[in-house]
Amino acid sequence: MTDLAQLELDLINAIGGAATVAAVEELRVAALGKSGTISGLLKGMGAMSPDERRDQGPKLNGLRDRVQSALAARKAELEAAELDARLLAEHVDLTLPARPHRRGSVHPTMQVMDEMIAVFADMGFAVAEGPDIEDDFHNFTALNFPPKHPAREMHDTFFLKPDPETGERKVLRTHTSPVQVRTMMSQTPPIRIIAPGRTFRKDSDATHTPMFHQIEGLVIDRDIHMGHLKTTLIHFIARFFEVDDVDARFRPHHFPFTEPSAEMDIRCDRSGGQLKLNTGSDWLEILGCGMVHPNVLRNCGIDPDEFQGFAFGMGVDRLAMLKYGVSDLRPMFEADTRWLAHYGFSAFAAPNAASGLS
């Protein structure tokens, strides 16, 4: 017969010397598992006589219970020690100041540009882009600017230093119309594009900055007329300001690259520092537009007797001011985080025509 007292002593000593929870588990399996020492003794009781079972049964059951209690106590002790060590290693000093939380937002100009692109994309327009630095041909000549036009002068336009070899002066584009020129010279009609981007002019006050953003549009196809232009713009303005319709008028104007040309005004009420559309007696200029000048079509290799088109352009920053109540354009470019926190938009709320723009 196995010496139960010695077996118990050996197991209790082994359990007390276990240094990890895993070691305690190994001892449990060795003693109480299916093939464990105590489990084997309990299984052997079936071969004992009734008198031996009455004598050994209580002893074996008591041994099993005491070993189980010792295992549970040692496991709890080791788990508590591991928890204390982990808490000590992961200690956080709650008296320290919190780490600064950086919060970003979408600039109103970028938000409005995305809104405008979403509306025009829903109307079937593609986005076209071009370089910020242009040559004279794409920025002026191809667009029917006369040689002495004020826009060609230094007081209106940012010119770069002349090329030492050719003498050509590059220019920071004054509009995104060069993108229209490049598109007409590289694609065959029909064309339906918008050209968003940065533009540069020597102008600075509450409503003008030297660098600003524009979106221009161009449609070239057969049998295009002024009615198509007016319908497109009225639909766009209504969708952009999220109203059912807009009361608009088109005033005759002059642009070198369109004929006839017009400026679009919308009826509004600006009393009380708010812009209310389709009411009041004020008219607000919103954009310039017109039918593409035949000379521009010829300069781009398109036959004006076969194809016609319309073009329009508007300031993104100006529309942002009107839609979201910004009174001064200059803070939009000063990187004041307080201003951005007030006027900024969530980066997770991208505008689309289905769920809404703003």
Image (tube, helix red, strand yellow):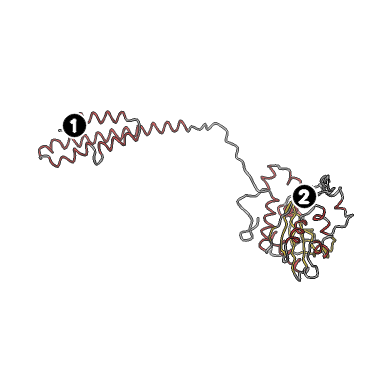
Between 331 and 162, the one lying in front of the other is 162
Give the labeled residue for mark 2: 133
Q: Quadrant of residue 298?
A: bottom right
**Badge 1 is on which residue?**
4
Task: Judge left or right: residue 276 versus residue 39.
Answer: right
Mark 2 → mark 1, Cα distance in angstroms? 95 Å
Badge 1 element: helix
**Whether residue 144 is situated above or below residue 162 in the rendered picture:** below
Residue 125 - label? none
* Place of residue 301 in the rendered image (x, y in percent of width and height, measured from the top left): 79, 63
- Neighbourhood count class around disc 2 (C-alpha, 10 Å): few under 14, some 14–19, many 20 upward: some
Could you say which is closer to the camera, residue 201 or residue 227?
Answer: 201
Q: Amino acid at mark 1?
A: Leu
Q: Quadrant of the N terminus?
A: top left
- Rendered location of residue 205, percent (x, y): 81, 47
- Three-letter amino acid code at disc 2? Ile
Q: Quick one: SS at disc 2?
A: strand
Using the image, determine if residue 48 lies above or below residue 290. Answer: above
For residue 6, what is the image quadrant? top left
